[in-house]
Image (tube, helix red, strand yellow):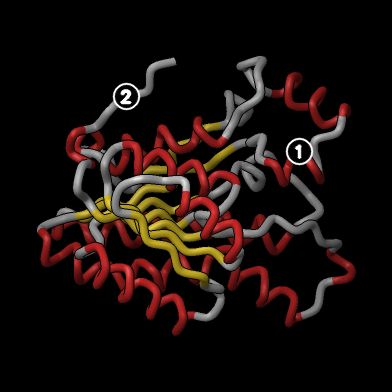
């Protein structure tokens, strides 16, 4: 299948969190294919360096734990110094570790919030001044369909991901006068290596086919293509929205 090319993305600087593997890896690959200058961070140093080494063009990688807000802010500053002002932010980093409600502790709850939503706000806070100076930008926050379908077994994750929608809507309202667009992408069950290894059982595949309107598996590229559109001039009228990419499950 021939993928679309968005001329408006060429030369733009994009910053992607959690970019070394899974959906994040596809974001990095696809923005690089568009000719964007791509900065990405991940806690997984080896995977990040491996990805950077096989891409051409302007690509910057930094190892970073997004729950360390000072380190995140420093990484954003370093990326902007290397590649230029950031006008596209993809808040992708997350961790969908399952957890039982009766085993939850306050510390673990705070950890789940830190990895799944807190960093999204502070990454946005760090790039917004650059976007304002540039005359606009696009912030894309990764949500999830898990809370929309009432999935159990990970209350802190689903609470955080539902909160992403509120974060997006608030920032979109605040930043609209600066021509900064803020949207959520909510993926369904995406066939990443992690999902295939940990969660996609024959029973899980049967559930997917029962609930999705589209009777096929979804892959990271399905999410990346939506992000490209929202980051490009073709998506210039889109803000304050939650775009669901789940094959029609919700």
Q: Quadrant of residue 233?
A: top left
Specify the label residue 109 is tagged with: none
Q: Which of marks 2 and 1 is nearer the N terminus?
A: 2
- From the image, tell me which residue sits under label 1: 196
Q: Is residue 216 left or right of residue 38?
A: right
Nearer the observer, 135 or 74: 74
Specify the label residue 4 is tagged with: 2
Looking at the image, can residue 236 be seen? no
Q: In which quarter of the image is residue 23?
A: top right
Percent position of residue 7, x then y: 18, 34
Residue at image position (72%, 46%) is 194
Q: Is mark 2 on a helix, strand or loop?
A: loop
**What's the CA distance linking mark 2 and mark 1?**
27 Å
Image position of 220 with respect to 79: above or below: above
Quadrant of image for the C terminus = top right
Q: Quadrant of residue 151?
A: top right
Percent position of residue 130, x then y: 19, 68
């Amino acid at each position: 299948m021939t993928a679309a090319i968005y001329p408006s993305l060429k030369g733009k600087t994009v910053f992607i969190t959690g970019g070394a593997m899974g959906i994040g890896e596809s974001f990095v690959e696809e923005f690089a294919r568009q000719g964007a200058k791509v900065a990405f961070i991940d806690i997984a140093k080896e995977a990040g360096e491996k990805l950077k080494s096989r891409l051409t063009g302007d690509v910057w990688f930094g190892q970073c734990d997004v729950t360390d807000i000072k380190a995140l802010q420093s990484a954003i500053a370093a990326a902007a110094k290397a590649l230029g002002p950031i006008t596209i932010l993809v808040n992708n980093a997350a961790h969908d570790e399952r957890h039982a409600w009766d085993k939850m502790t306050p510390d673990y709850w705070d950890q789940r919030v830190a990895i799944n939503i807190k960093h999204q706000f502070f990454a946005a806070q760090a790039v917004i001044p650059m976007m304002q100076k540039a005359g606009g930008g696009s912030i894309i926050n990764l949500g999830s369909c898990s809370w929309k379908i009432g999935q159990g077994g990970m209350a802190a994750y689903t609470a955080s991901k539902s909160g992403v929608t509120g974060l997006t809507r608030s920032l979109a309202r605040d930043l609209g006068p600066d021509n900064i667009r803020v949207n959520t992408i909510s993926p369904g069950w995406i066939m990443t290596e992690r999902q295939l290894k940990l969660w996609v059982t024959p029973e899980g595949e049967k559930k997917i086919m029962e609930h999705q309107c589209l009777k096929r598996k979804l892959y990271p590229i399905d999410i990346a293509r939506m992000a490209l559109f929202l980051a490009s001039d073709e998506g210039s009228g889109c803000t304050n929205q939650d775009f669901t990419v789940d094959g029609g499950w919700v």
